[in-house]
Image (tube, coloured by chain):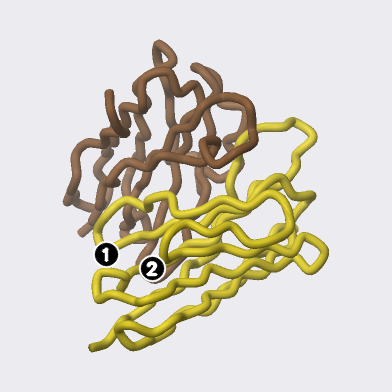
Amino acid sequence: GQNIDQPTEMTATEGAIVQINCTYQTSGFNGLFWYQQHAGEAPTFLSYNVLDGLEEKGRFSSFLSRSKGYSYLLLKELQMKDSASYLCAVRPMFSGGYNKLIFGAGTRLAVHP
Amino acid sequence: GAGVSQSPSNKVTEKGKDVELRCDPISGHTALYWYRQSLGQGLEFLIYFQGNSAPDKSGLPSDRFSAERTGGSVSTLTIQRTQQEDSAVYLCASSPHSPYRGPGSGYTFGSGTRLTVV
């Protein structure tokens, strides 16, 4: 079956660094996405990994290890506006081959002053 | 359009009534998806469209749920005889058909329809 796990909640302090982990078990692998979702709003794209290693984009970085079925999202220099849910999503490899993403339940991050 | 548009943004309905939720995807995106997000839960896949056909309906929770897409564009999700457990945010997303690689192959989501069944 398909399974994606991430912590339910995390808290951090403004200006600090936080790492949100995601582990997955899927039918093959064809890319991992991180989305940010503020309360009451649509999820928005943050990052994409398909090869092992670190992808850096400003204050946000995402890491992938395919052999371990593991990814993390690293947020640096936290700001109050980073308080949101962070969704990990994996695109498995189906024999039918279409662009279906499987989502984790999301990690709710609260940034405090 | 520039983004994925969903309507209505909020819908309150009485138990037993039928509701229709609408999604207008990004122009040129051939793939369209419906997800459901219940309070405190992750995104639950409902149905996928490629053009006007639905190769994967495996996530529809019961036969009260149906969806169609016309002209390869607008999609309507219909819930018949609504129940309280249908209360959730219904999200629509679209993506390019191919290639399935690169950051651009992810989804663009609409803002969702918050459905409340009373």
Are the residues tagged 1 and 2 within 8 Å (C-beta)? yes
- Dot 2 falls on which chain? A
What is the display colour for chain B? brown
Q: Where is residue B95 in the image (x, y as percent from the top left)?
A: 48, 32
- Residue ID at (74%, 31%): A96
What is the display colour for chain A? yellow
Q: Do labels 1 and 2 share a chain?
A: yes
- Residue ID at (78%, 51%): A27
10 Å crowding of disc 1: few (<14), some (14-19), many (20+)? few
- Residue ID at (32%, 31%): B23
Rendered view: A12 above or below B34: below
- Dot 1 falls on which chain? A
Where the N terminus of chain B falls, by quadrant?
top left
Q: What element carries label 1?
A: loop
10 Å crowding of disc 2: few (<14), some (14-19), many (20+)? many
Q: A96 left or right of B77?
A: right
Lower position in the chain sequence, tag 1 or tag 2: 1
Q: Quadrant of residue B103?
A: top right
- Judging depth in this view, the residue of B116 and B83 nearest the camera is B116
- Residue ID at (24%, 43%): B17
Q: What element carries label 2?
A: strand
Q: In which quarter of the image is residue A59?
A: bottom left
User: What residue sits right under mark 2 in the picture?
Assistant: A85
Task: Point out the residue furthest to the top here.
Answer: B71
Rendered view: A14 above or below A66: below
Q: Position of residue A17 (x, y in %)?
A: 44, 81
User: What residue sits right under mark 1 in the picture?
Assistant: A39
Residue type (three-letter) at the residue carrying disc 2:
Ser
